[in-house]
Image: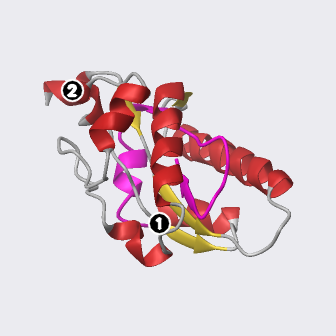
Amino acid sequence: MAILKLSLVLLVLHVVQLQGNSMSDCEGEAQRYLWDNLNGYRRSLHLNNFTDNSNAACLANKIADQLKNDTCKNAFNFSPTPGTKPNVPKFDKFLHKCDIKDKRAVDGIILPICVPRLDPIVVFSNYTKSQYAKYLKNSNYMGLGLPLRIIEWWLF
């Protein structure tokens, strides 16, 4: 359990099947909504806010770019178990490109969900009212990687 005492990175995989062309406003709005509400959720539990982790965001974007042509049904092919590497092709290469040490990668977690039409309220509910809520409630997870852009796959 000493691993969990470290400054952990919460890397949340969020899969979005987009329908529509106006993404830039939608992206920023959904991103702000989710960031604010995840931190609000943490505050309601008397936990510290997540901090922005640019390395985790880099990793999220690399994985999203690789999986952009996959469908939502493939969202659940990743291991949500801390201490193990996720089943992501080229994962080690992405770690290196994002300057993440192998040891740090297994301290984080990828949490996949699929939400059509980028409804941020549904996204938030899927994280806080699912099996993933235990990770949001865990004070050992302190960093969160948010993506820079939305494509078919959107990773947090």
In the image, residue 132 lies in the stretch drawn in magenta? yes
**Is residue 138 part of the magenta span, yes or no?**
yes
| Residue at point 70%, 68% (across, down) | 119
Q: Residue at x 22, y 51 (%)?
A: 81
Q: In the picture shown, does residue 4 fall above or below 112?
A: above
Other-residue count near label 1 (Cα within 10 Å), few / some / many at <14 / 14–19 / ≥20: many
Instruction: Label 2, secondary structure: give it.
Output: helix
Q: Which residue does the numbered mark 1 point to in the structure image?
A: 113
Q: Main secondary structure of the magenta part?
A: loop
Q: What's the residue at 47%, 70% (across, down)?
A: 70
Residue 121 location (% of width, % of height): 67, 65
Determine which quarter of the picture holds residue 87: bottom left
Q: Amino acid at mark 1?
A: Ile
Q: Earlier in the sequence, mark 1 or mark 2?
A: 2
Q: Position of residue 4 (x, y in %)?
A: 23, 30
Q: Which residues are magenta?
A: 129-156
